[in-house]
Amino acid sequence: MKKITCLLLLALTVLASCKKEASTEEDAPVTGTSANQRYVRKNAHSPEAQKDLEALAKAIAIMKKKGCDDPTSWYYQGAIHWVPDTIVGANKLCPDYQTYKDLKDAWDNCTHTDAGTEQIHFLVWHRMFIYHFEKIIRKVSGKADFALPYWGYTNTTDEATNRTLPAIFSDKSSSLYQSARLDSLLNGQPISGKTVRRISLTKLNEYNTYALYNENIDAAPHGAMHNYIGYGNDTLGKAKYNEIWQKKTDGMMAEVATAGFDPIFWLHHSNIDRIWQQWTNSANGKQVLLAELQKVPWKYQFFDENGKKVTYTMEQVVDMLYTMDYDFDDTKVEPKPVEKSPLVFSVKNFSKGDTLSISSKRVALNKDIKVSLPNAKGKNVVLMSEKNKKGEMLILTVTVSFAKVPKGDFEVYLNLPTNVKATPENDHFAGFMTFFGADHKHNHTSSVKAHARKTKTFTFDITDEAVDTQAMAKQAFDVSILGFNGNKADDIQIEKISVLKQ
């Protein structure tokens, strides 16, 4: 009997082992860490982060020596975000990749698309992306407690320091150096000019739906910082040699197809991940709901620290989003109670929403403009705000078209008086319009002809602004759009402005 019992136990152990091994091949996530182990992502300018930065530099130097068919190589990881459709001339960095027909597993998978519908996955996909990258760095560097630092350029304390590029990224002897960046950053100067306005979080933190928060953080500070690192406030642009394109272009970070190859990409997105979690932890913050992601299916496919492919269902992604194995040095990554009837911004409901006013008059955006939209139904709308939680949301949409993606960006205001200074901190500010990735084509095709104008729609929650400026009592919604940087000769036009309630 004892012998039979031992044989049965042995058989069960072997069977369990086989099941576990099979699950790591394709479907089940592999973390490679203790269930109780937690890591701390630190401010890259802090003394505590320096060992992690050294480990990052060590690992990327090793990864750059690996062949691009290795999922833990620098080239492979960068290409998961995106890679140029075509490399002109022999590809010096990845000889077996020449055009999109040579794409490898999980490449070209970021959520910046010309359709824009996949934007709902922006924050979620990038959290998963850098999470897996972090584990690869931990193993390759050999630093068992490695956690990906963040570049805290949005910090409101010690701004002079936090707005400068962490020093190791300007060290030409470091694997973290990249010449195709804005010169002033490489020279140790802080973020300057109007871009300082784009890293304001005042309006962003007022959002109380995930979908609109996600869309607007994508524009700024996320997209604004991509562009700034790439070419800054220089509207003429100073082309630099981009080693991925193998030609002169804007800086590496300003191009969706090459951004993931610049080491600063990871610290930039670590900070975006951090401020998203700070909003989630705040009174206004909401967790993303499974139903929101399921409306637009997306493939969540990455590689673990052992180079094994890991594919997640959206259910698995939502289950782990707020139970990660890391925190930030000033922010805990944790779930929060989900409301029984959470406020959800719905694209479906929005499209059927009650249009209060609309203007389809085409207006050139080569100067600051103000568009007045008649407010015929306003007095019958009870708005939801901090003052009135049971009312309705007021939504502003601005659709623009352009022949070529503008390098400048714009600020949108509601009912801005002539005697009030326009700042992202005042009660009239609606949001930013930036254009990182606005011409990026997904799936290497586009239904829009090459010579045709491209369009992009920006969506803002202006409920609080409408309450603060007594907009519903006015005869018109005055929408001001102010341009910053950019070229006055840019062919960009307003196609439609709408005010809707939901």
Image: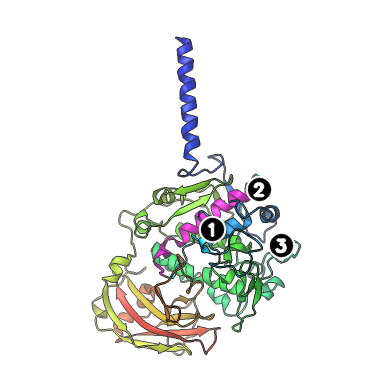
- The answer to which of 465 and 112 lies nearer the viewer is 112
| Of marks 3 and 1, the one in the foreground | 1
User: What kind of residue is marked 2?
Assistant: Val
User: What kind of residue is marked 1?
Assistant: Ile
Q: Is residue 351 visible?
A: yes
Q: Position of residue 83 (x, y in %)?
A: 55, 64
Q: Position of residue 388 (x, y in %)?
A: 32, 68
Which residue has dot 3 on it?
Answer: 168
Which residue has dot 1 on it?
Answer: 80
Q: Is residue 274 visible?
A: no
Residue positioned 50% across, 36% down in the render: 21
Element assignment for label 2: helix
Instruction: Pick whichever of labels 2 and 3 is earlier in the sequence.
Output: 2
Is the residue marked by circle 1 packed among few (<14), some (14-19), or many (20+) residues within 10 Å? many
Question: Is 148 located above or below residue 188 in the figure?
Answer: above
Q: Is residue 143 left or right of residue 235?
A: right
User: What kind of residue is marked 3?
Assistant: Ile
Is the residue marked by circle 2 packed among few (<14), some (14-19), or many (20+) residues within 10 Å? many
Tell whether label 1 touches label 3 (CB within 8 Å): no
Gap in angstroms between the C-alphas marked 2 and 3: 19 Å
